[in-house]
Amino acid sequence: SFCTLLRAPKKAMQTDVAKYVDEGLFGEGGVVVGVGKGVVVAKLCKPENLNALSARMTEGLMKVTELCRKHAGEVRVVVLTGEGRFFCSGADAKSLRGATPDRIAQDSLNFGKFLKNLSTLPQLVIGVAQGSAFGGGFGLLCCCDIVIASPESQFALSEVRLGMIPATISPYVVRRIGVNNSRRLFLTGERFNATGGKAYGLVNDVVPKDQHTTYLEKLLKDQTLCAPNAVVQAKNLINLVENRPLTDELIQDTVAELIKIRSGKEVREGATAMLQKRKPKWADEPLALPSKL
C-alpha cells in the first residue's frame, strides 16, 4: 500500500494521518498519504475514475492541507501527485448531472476553500503530473509552487466543451499562466502537451515518469540548504507584493518584512556558516520521501 507510515518513533503528523486512514478519509476517499522525513506526499488514487474530484476526495485533500499547516514545524515539503494515466480529470462527471443548485454551491465552496488552503500553505508544494490534468486538475497544479510533468501528459481547461466555465479555479489559473494565455485556453478548451504546458507557464520541468523520484530526491537535497523559516517568509512575501502598485506603502511593507527576518536566528546562523565556510545547521536535517511512492 502507498499509505505506509514510517515506523517508530511516530511524529505528530504521522499519528494524525494514521487516524484519518483508520476513519476511511484517507485511502477509501481516494486520497492516500505517505509521510517521510519532513515531506508529505498526497496521492490521488481513483484511477478507475480518472482521479476525478468527488466531494469525498476534496474533503480528503482539504484534510491533508489542514494537517500540513498544523504541523508546519515538522513538514517542510508537500508533494501532490496521482495514480494512473490521469493526474486528475477534473470534476466528477456524475456530479454534473442532476445536482441541485444548493449542492453545486456547497461543493464549489468546499473546493474553493481547499484551493485557497493549498495555494497558501507555508511549505514548498510540488505538483507531480504523472498523467494528464483537465479542468479542476489543471487548477490543482496552478496552486503548486513547482510543477513537473511527464512528456506524455495532456492538459486542458475543457470546461467550455462541457457547457461550463472554470470558475472556482480561475484566480489560480490566471495567476499562474497570465491573462493572455487564460483568454485562449478558457475560451477554446484546447488540449496541449507537457512542452506546451511549459511554454504557457503551467509546467516548470518536463521529466520522464521513470525519473520523477530521482528528480524529487535531488530537489529535496537542494531544499535542505534553504532555511525553513526563510522559505515560509519568502512565500508570504510573494503574496504580499503580488499585483500591488509600486507605492511608498509597498516599499515600507517590504522593508518591514526584511527587518523582521534579519533579526531572526536563521540569518545569524547563515552568516556565521558562510564566514566559517561550512553548511548551516539546518542543512543537517535531511528531507526524504516516504519509503513507497
Image: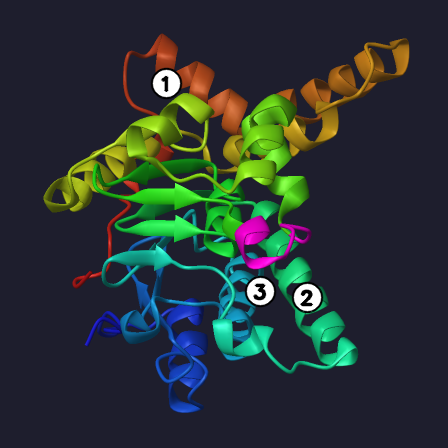
**Marks 1/3: CA–CA distance:** 34 Å
Q: Secondary structure at mark 2?
A: helix
Give the residue displayed 37% in from the left and 71% down from the top.
14
Q: Is residue 224 visible?
A: no
Residue type at mark 1?
Ala
User: In percent of the image, x 77 and y 76: which residue is there?
Assistant: 101
Q: Disc 2 or 1, which lies upstream in sequence?
A: 2
Seen at 29% across and 39% down, the residue is 149
Determine which of the numbered discs, if any, sits on residue 96 in the image. Answer: none
Task: Mark 2 or mark 3: name the one nearer the start of the chain.
Answer: 3
Which residue bears the numbered disc 3?
66
> How dense is the environment of label 1, judged by Cα within 10 Å: few (below 14), some, or many (20 and up)?
some
Q: Position of residue 218 (x, y in %)?
A: 21, 34
Q: Measuring from the top left, give residue 58's x and y in whole percent.
A: 54, 70
Q: Are marks 2 and 3 in contact (CB under 8 Å)?
A: no
Marks 2 and 3, how far apart at CA: 18 Å
* Number of the front mark, 1 or 3: 3
Determine crowd level at label 3: few under 14, some 14-19, many 20+ residues with C-alpha closer than 10 A.
some
Q: Tell me which corner region of the image, top left, top right, bottom left or bottom right, holds residue 36.
A: bottom left
For numbered disc 1, what is the local secondary structure? helix
Residue tagged by mark 2?
108
Residue 111 falls in image quadrant:
bottom right
- Image quadrant where residue 223 sits: top left
Image x and y of residue 123, in percent: 49, 45
Magenta-highlighted residues: 159-168
The tag earlier along the polypeptide, 1 or 3, is: 3
Q: Is residue 288 visible?
A: yes
Residue 273 shows which numbered tag? 1
